[in-house]
Image (tube, helix red, strand yellow):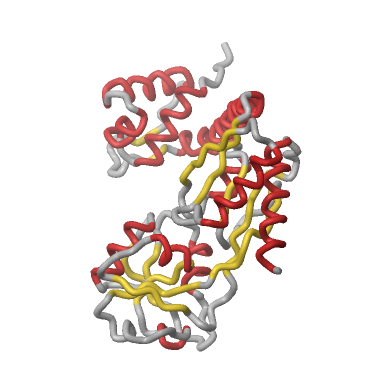
Amino acid sequence: MVATLNLHLARYLATVVDEGHFGRAARRLHVSGSALSKQVRTLEDKLGVELVDRSAHPVVPTEAGRLFLAEAREALAAADRALAAVAAHRRAGAGVLRLGFMTATTGAHTRRILERMRQEVPDVSVQLVHLPWSAQADAVRDRTVDACLVGPPILDAAGVRLDLVRHETLVVALSAGHRLAHRSSVGLADLDDEVHITDDRADPRWVRWWAHDPRPSGRPVRYGASAHTVDEMLEVVASGVAIAITGGYVGGSHRHPGIVFLPVVDAHPCPISLCSRVDDTSPAVEALRQAVDADRTASDR
């Protein structure tokens, strides 16, 4: 009898391996640890092999588990895309557009763009969806959102189009007691000896883009504490253990008594763009693209 792939069980196994721990995986999946262990054992019994090494800490896949997951993850991703495609179709029929955003990018520009869009498609309602810093384009591709306001860098632009919304000034976030805090602006050379915040969950290329690594001076950039959200970043900076180069929109929307934001005069441009799927020609997304173009044209005058 040929075994068939149970996506539910495959997802349980993938989560255990990703977390390296049955207890953490169970909490993520909202099941009990014993139930999760039983489900993984059921999958192993169906396949006739052990898939994880339960004696290892953290839990790791066996060779058979690695082979299985290499293919099963593709099936899980395809299933997720199929479900997302149906959900997007249902939202379109209900007149709903899901717009992803990074923290602090929903400012006056965004409000103007949405107002312009509503003039063209008044029956469409907009749901704002907060997304992690470096995952915006993926959320558009997998249809978690219909479009997204993204900041650079876009590491994989396959299947998406980018419509420029505006350019943002880059600033450095410093603790209020920092040696440079009294300045009105800084250059990258002023920051060469500083420890920069990193993000251990993000692609290293994304981290390096924001830190301006490599530097014009050729000096290596030093990294320290990790932060995954703007709020975490601000708390790390306020503690004085690291600095962060970020978009000017962060300084404009996040006030913190322990932090100053200074323009970085020789930083590279920071475009904020509307990211949407190339093949999406729905009236709502088309109206959103046109609104972005109209707002940018009006701002350039």
> Residue at position x 47%, y 83% from top?
188
> Residue at position x 53%, y 69% from top?
209
> Residue at position x 50%, y 75% from top?
213
Q: Is residue 257 left or right of residue 111?
A: left
- Residue 274, horizontal then vertical, whole percent: 63, 52
Locate the N terminus by quadrant.
top right
Relative to 8, say whether 119 is above or below: below
Relative to 271, say whether 148 is above or below: above
- Residue 281, horizontal then vertical, whole percent: 75, 38
- Is residue 25 visible in the rendered image? The answer is yes
Q: Is residue 284 left or right of residue 222?
A: right
- Is residue 78 visible in the rendered image? The answer is no
Q: Quadrant of residue 50?
A: top left
Relative to 23, say whether 155 is above or below: below
Q: Quadrant of residue 256?
A: bottom left
Q: Quadrant of residue 30?
A: top left
In this rendered view, identify the residue nearer to me: 38 or 234. Answer: 234
In this rendered view, identify the residue nearer to me: 139 or 293. Answer: 293
Total numbered badges shown on the rendered structure: 0
- Residue 204, horizontal then vertical, whole percent: 49, 63
Please identify the residue farthest to the top as the structure is shown: 1
> Residue at position x 34%, y 34% from top?
28
- Residue 35, horizontal then vertical, whole percent: 31, 20
Locate the C terminus by quadrant.
bottom right
